[in-house]
Image (cartoon, rainbow, N blue to C red):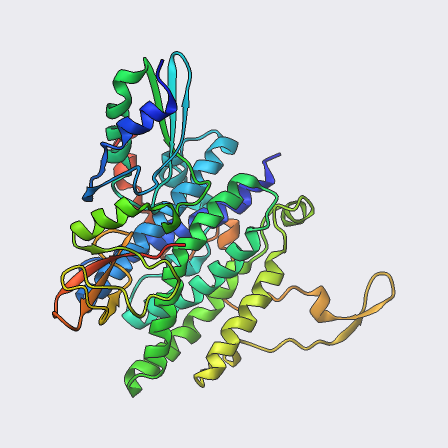
């Protein structure tokens, strides 16, 4: 049986690795130089964080960190599909960035209390550095939400397109109940989801973007149903809210955009196994 | 007999490759030094996890300690996290000498980071992301020079 800590580390590391790779594609193409530097620096940080996490995983898994980052088959990556989406337009990248960084902040803050010492130490470093990403994402959020009509419209649309995929960042992890019972996860992915939703919901409301959330499928019914023990409880407590789109990443099921990214990201590693740089 | 203090003294000569006026001991990068008869172990703290100079720093540290023991092991560790509280006064002077404004000792980066050229505190942050992960890009409204600031990572 595999170590339950591996499913958590793969999810965290792959989100950072794949997002970092995607963001690095902006280098040289961002509308202006300061922002080019910003997205490139953020990409660099994310890949460095992936490396920290894969270093920890390497001790559990036995494979070296490069093999873990670049030597796996596409179906073995556990990133949420939000992270692999093509950059298409700048507003979409910034929408994903904002949704992701708030989600990342919620889970990292929770993991500060993890019983898993090496992870807790890495998380302390990551939080100190992710702060700049979050400030950057929030600055763009305010700027585009207050911006000229076209900017506001495109950003709002991008948020609506990305939100379902962002919710899937909180898809349950393999062996999550074991992780929670051992204190490796101080709180579960469902609680993270709810905290994130409350946080971004408040910010979306403030700028009049509340339609971003209501555009997502049917609201929960909260219908009362009997359970196997004959008690009545609301469906809200039984049925985990399933993201309307974008789930599957944590099981290794990816969108059609993953494979081209993987082919490029791993090209050198596959062509020259064991190459050092 | 070589002591940890000797090793630290040797490491004081190692400069940050991206801030050549500044020693890695003044930057607080050297965390722990353990010395035995045949072995020296040195734990370093990255200022930022994504710092591209890490490999160069590691190599320079190995080089600087080479003559002190037959076996040297240098590694980067995550704990404790590096923060600006690890900088000493010499680091502040060395940063200024290189044209980088040292970090403020309080959170809140919007005001009163002084310009390393004219000393004015009429400066603004243009971007939190500079040429390296540890630096920001700022602008001085008095002498109208762009300059770099050290991030207040803490």
Q: Residue at x 59, y 50 (%)?
A: A113
Q: Residue at x 72, y 70 (%)?
A: A235
Camera sees residue A274: no
Q: Which of B96 and A248 is in front in this view?
A: B96
Q: Quadrant of residue A23?
A: bottom left
Quarter of the image that includes the N terminus of chain A: top right
Q: Where is residue A267 in the image (x, y as percent from the top left)?
A: 27, 41
How many tags in the picture? 0
Q: Residue at x 32, y 13 (%)?
A: B70
Above/below status of B5 relative to A100: above
Image check: A155 left or right of A231?
left
Q: In which quarter of the image is residue A149?
A: bottom left
Above/below status of B2 relative to B89: above
Q: Which of B14 and A244 is in front in this view?
A: B14
Image check: A196 left or right of A179?
left
Camera sees residue B78: yes
Q: Where is residue B143 in the image (x, y as percent from the top left)?
A: 12, 69
Image check: B14 left or right of A12?
left
Q: Where is residue B14 in the image (x, y as percent from the top left)?
A: 23, 33
Q: Position of residue B5 (x, y in %)?
A: 35, 26
Above/below status of A196 relative to A12: below
Image check: A194 left or right of A154?
right
Above/below status of B50 relative to A68: below
Quarter of the image that includes the C terminus of chain A: top left
């Amino acid at each position: 049986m595999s170590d339950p800590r591996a499913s958590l580390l793969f999810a965290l590391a792959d989100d950072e690795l794949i997002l970092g790779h995607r963001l690095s594609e902006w280098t040289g193409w961002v509308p202006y130089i300061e922002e080019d530097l910003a997205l490139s620096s953020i990409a660099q940080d994310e890949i460095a964080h992936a490396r920290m996490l894969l270093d920890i995983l390497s001790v559990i898994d036995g494979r070296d960190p490069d093999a873990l980052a670049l030597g796996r088959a596409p179906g073995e990556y556990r990133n949420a599909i939000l992270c692999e989406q093509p950059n298409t337009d700048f507003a979409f990248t910034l929408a994903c960035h904002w949704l992701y960084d708030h989600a990342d902040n919620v889970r990292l803050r929770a993991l500060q209390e993890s019983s898993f010492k090496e992870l807790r130490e890495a998380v302390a470093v990551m939080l100190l550095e992710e702060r700049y990403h979050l400030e950057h994402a929030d600055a763009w959020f305010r700027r585009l939400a207050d911006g000229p009509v076209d900017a506001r419209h495109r950003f709002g649309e991008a948020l609506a397109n990305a939100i379902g995929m962002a919710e899937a960042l909180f898809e349950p992890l393999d062996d999550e109940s074991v992780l929670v019972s051992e204190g490796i996860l101080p709180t579960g992915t469902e609680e993270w989801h709810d905290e994130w939703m409350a946080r971004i919901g408040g910010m979306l409301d403030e700028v009049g973007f509340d339609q971003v959330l209501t555009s997502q499928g049917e609201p929960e019914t909260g219908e009362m149903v009997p359970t196997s023990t004959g008690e009545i409880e609301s469906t809200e407590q039984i049925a985990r809210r399933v993201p309307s789109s974008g789930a599957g990443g944590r099981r290794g099921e990816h969108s059609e955009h993953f494979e081209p990214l993987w082919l490029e990201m791993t090209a050198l590693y596959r062509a020259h196994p064991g190459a050092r740089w | 007999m070589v002591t940890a203090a000797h090793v630290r003294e040797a490491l004081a000569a190692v400069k940050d490759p991206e801030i050549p006026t500044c020693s890695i001991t003044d930057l607080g990068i050297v965390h722990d030094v353990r010395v035995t008869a045949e072995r020296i172990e040195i734990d370093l703290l990255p200022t930022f996890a994504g710092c591209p100079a890490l490999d160069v720093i590691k190599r320079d540290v190995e080089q600087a300690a080479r003559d002190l023991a037959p076996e040297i092991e240098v590694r980067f560790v995550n704990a404790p996290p590096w923060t600006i509280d690890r900088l000493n006064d010499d680091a502040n002077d060395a940063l200024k000498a290189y044209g980088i404004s040292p970090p403020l000792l309080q959170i809140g980066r919007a005001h009163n980071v002084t310009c390393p050229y004219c000393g004015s505190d009429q400066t603004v942050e243009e971007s939190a992301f500079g040429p390296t992960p540890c630096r920001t890009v700022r602008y001085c409204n008095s002498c109208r020079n762009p300059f770099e600031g050290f991030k207040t990572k803490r």
